[in-house]
Amino acid sequence: MKKNIVLFSLFILPIVAYLFFASGVHNFTHLPIVTKSIPDLSEWKTVKGETFSLQDKITILAFPGTKVLYNKGDAFNLNQKIYDKVKDFKDFQLIYIAPIGTEAETEQVKEELSRISDLSKWNYIFATPQEIKEYYATLNLVGQLDENYGTPNVFIIDKELNLRGRKGLNKKGEPEYKEGYNTISAADLHNEMGDDIKIILAEYRLALKKNSADRKK
């Protein structure tokens, strides 16, 4: 009996441990695509007339709706739990698509946030409510905009304009689907979105290292 236990410890446990960690690496080195090739948004402008593209950027995309000041706590959560930790990544940006008419409210939120954070990569662009509804529909998501053309959820868009999230089986082998991250919940941002944005950044860091190594060969 003791001999069997020893043999199990020496040979079987290491294999089980390897399979466990190998599956963990697989789950944590790639974030699934939820929606492929969403449209760009370069036709919409900021209050200063600036335009932005999703191409070649890692973007957090948000829809604040018309209740910008009422929901400013969501923006503060996003700023503290996510934005402030990744804003220095070279190809990162945060884009809010806000309804025309909310320009003054968005400026007030930015002014308040700028007292505690560098907002050089935090931007609001403006579109009509109908344009926002039509654009959101192209994301092909389960969650919908509310009556104010907004949602507390924010979304991760990669450099190829794919919306990323959780889709398939998790580490426990259970079905999992997550298309956005709830800014009302500090825990959702800190835990799930924090992990997932790190995965996206790690993907591109690895790609850069591989490209650099390939050029040296």
Image: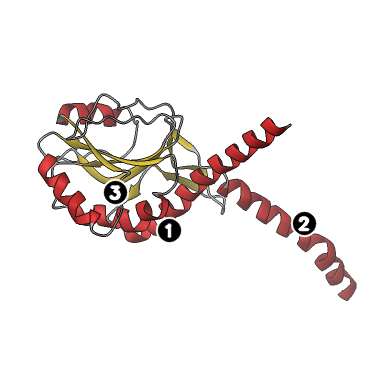
Query: How far is mark 2 from mark 1, CA to CA?
Result: 30 Å
In the picture, which quadrant includes the N terminus?
Answer: bottom right
- Of badges 2 and 1, nearer the viewer stands 1
Q: Which of marks 2 and 1 is nearer the N terminus?
A: 2
- 11 relative position to 168: left or right: right
| Horizontal relation, residue 161 to residue 7: left or right | left
Residue 160 percent across, percent down from the top left: 46, 29
Q: Residue at x 16, y 45 (%)?
A: 106
Q: First in sequence: mark 1 or mark 3?
A: 3
Q: Distance between the residues labelled 1 and 3?
A: 23 Å
Q: Is mark 3 on a helix, strand or loop?
A: loop
Residue pointed to by mark 1: 191
Foreground of the two, 3 or 46 = 46
The secondary structure type at the circle numbered 1 is helix
The residue at the point 71 percent across, 59 percent down is 17
Residue 68, visible in the rendered structure: no
Residue sitting at 35 percent across and 29 percent down?
53
Rendered image quadrant of residue 126: top left
Closer-to-camera residue (1/35): 35
The x, y position of residue 80, in whole percent, is 33, 58
